[in-house]
Amino acid sequence: MLWVPAVVALALVVLPVLGLLTRVDPTALPGLLTSPAALDALRLSVVTGLISTGLSLLLGGPLAVVLARSRMRGLRVVRAFVLLPLVLPPVVGGLALLYLLGRTGPLGQLLDVVGLRLPYTTTAVVLAQTFVAMPFLVVGLEGALRTAGGRYEQVAATLGAGPWLTFRRVTVPLLLPALGSSLVLTFARALGEFGATITFAGSLQGTTRTLPLAVYTTAQSDVDAAVAMSLLLVVVALVVIVVARPKAVEGQL
């Protein structure tokens, strides 16, 4: 009996994607995908996605360790704020970034004094992607830290290893599979980010117009080109997920 709702659920996900294929002319697809607008958007999406994934690792990795290992009071509240971008509409995140780092925002005014303006720049794209994607990395690493490694760390400690040596030689190797899965999911989420990016960074070809923004902008004037870009985004996302085979997606995390 479970097959019926399972098939319906799968069809609900797969059929709309397959529907894109019925809308575009296969012979026109190469020309549409190699247009300057599509290539610029793809390049910007991949570059900013990689940078935001690296930034998520640099900042979110230590945050996951603190959340998993710390016993400080109020940790539940801190975790709620960390997970907030997962449930917030992305456009709300974009507005929050804009009113913090924009010219009238408290941090934006300080940056403006030294001649640094972030909104509507490529840096703003990276910040928006990091804002919405970093929680995926934090959640994955924190879960792995809570379920694996504690006993081995205790053994290492009894053998005289200090906290830093234990972290490097015991904790980090145990976390590598979960780290890989979390990085893949973080990159995939950054690649598909739309709401926060268009609110905080705008849509300027070659500077802030990533592939999702290019799909939205192009759809208003050329539906076929927008569908072709959508298919490109689907293919890139599937390659990232299928080739990397994240264990979190397969339920092995």
Image (tube, grey):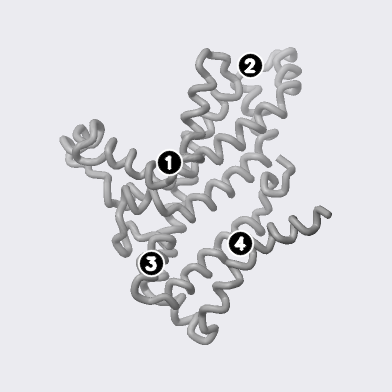
Residue 235 horizontal/vertical position (percent): 57, 66
Between the C-alphas of marks 4 and 1, the distance is: 23 Å
Residue annotated with mark 1 = 131
Labels 1 and 3 touching (C-beta < 8 A): no
What residue do we see at 63% from left, 22% from top? 165
Labels 2 and 1 touching (C-beta < 8 A): no
Quarter holding residue 118: top left
Determine whether 62 is above or below 242 in the image.
above
Determine whether 156 is above or below 235 in the image.
above
Q: Is residue 65 left or right of residue 147?
A: left
Determine whether 120 is above or below 152 in the image.
below
Mark 2 or mark 3, which has the lower sequence index? 3
Between the C-alphas of marks 2 and 4, the distance is: 41 Å
Within 10 Å of disc 4 (Cα), the crowding (few <14, some 14-19, many 20+) is few
Q: Is residue 44 left or right of residue 54?
A: left
Q: Amino acid at mark 2?
A: Gly
Q: Quadrant of the C terminus?
A: top right
Q: Amino acid at mark 1?
A: Phe
Front-most of residues 4 and 232: 4
Which numbered tag is attached to residue 40? 3
Circle 2 or circle 4, nearest the eye: 4
Between the C-alphas of marks 2 and 1, the distance is: 34 Å
Mark 3 or mark 4, which has the lower sequence index? 3
What residue do we see at 66% from left, 40% from top? 178
Is disc 1 placed on a helix, strand or loop? Answer: helix
